[in-house]
Amino acid sequence: ALFIIAIAASEVAIGLGLVILWFKKFKSLDIDSLNAMKG
């Protein structure tokens, strides 16, 4: 059970890191620009 919690916590940390990088790069959290990145 502890292993699953650790994995979940690391996934959250990675997700937050990506959001922070995105915010620093584009200075906004515009969903349209996010969709443009997907192609």
Image (cartoon, rainbow, N blue to C red):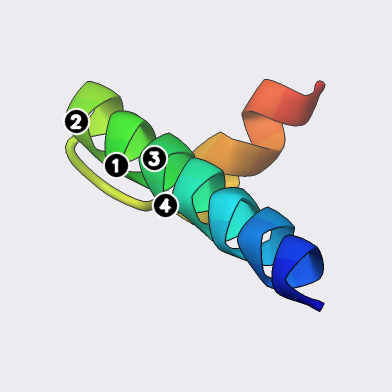
Residue at x 56%, y 62% (from the top left corner): 9
Q: CA distance from mark 4 to mark 2?
A: 12 Å
Name the residue type under label 3. Answer: Gly
Residue at x 52%, y 37% (from the top left corner): 33
Asked if disc 1 and disc 2 are in contact, CB closer than 8 Å, the reply is yes
Residue nearer the viewer, 29 or 14 = 14
Residue nearer the viewer, 6 or 33 = 6
Pointer 1 local density, CA inside 10 Å: few below 14, some 14–19, many at least 20: some
Pointer 4 local density, CA inside 10 Å: few below 14, some 14–19, many at least 20: few
Q: Could you tell me which secondary element the residue under label 2 belongs to? A: helix
Instruction: Give the number of marks.
Output: 4
> Of the residues under marks 3 and 2, which one precedes in the sequence?
3
Q: CA distance from mark 1 to mark 2?
A: 6 Å
Residue at x 77%, y 28% (from the top left corner): 38
Asked if disc 1 and disc 4 are in contact, CB closer than 8 Å, the reply is yes
Residue 24's disc number: 2
Q: CA distance from mark 3 to mark 4?
A: 4 Å
Q: CA distance from mark 3 to mark 2?
A: 11 Å
Q: CA distance from mark 3 to mark 1?
A: 5 Å
Q: CA distance from mark 1 to mark 4?
A: 6 Å
Residue 37 sits above or below residue 3 on the image: above
| Foreground tag (3 vs 1) | 3
Pointer 2 local density, CA inside 10 Å: few below 14, some 14–19, many at least 20: few
Q: Could you tell me which secondary element the residue under label 1 belongs to? A: helix
Residue at x 68%, y 71% (from the top left corner): 5
Name the residue type under label 2. Answer: Lys
Asked if disc 3 and disc 1 are in contact, CB closer than 8 Å, the reply is yes
The residue that label 1 is drawn on is: 20
Residue nearer the viewer, 6 or 21 = 6
Asked if disc 3 and disc 4 are in contact, CB closer than 8 Å, the reply is yes
Q: Horizontal and vertical percent for residue 35?
A: 69, 40
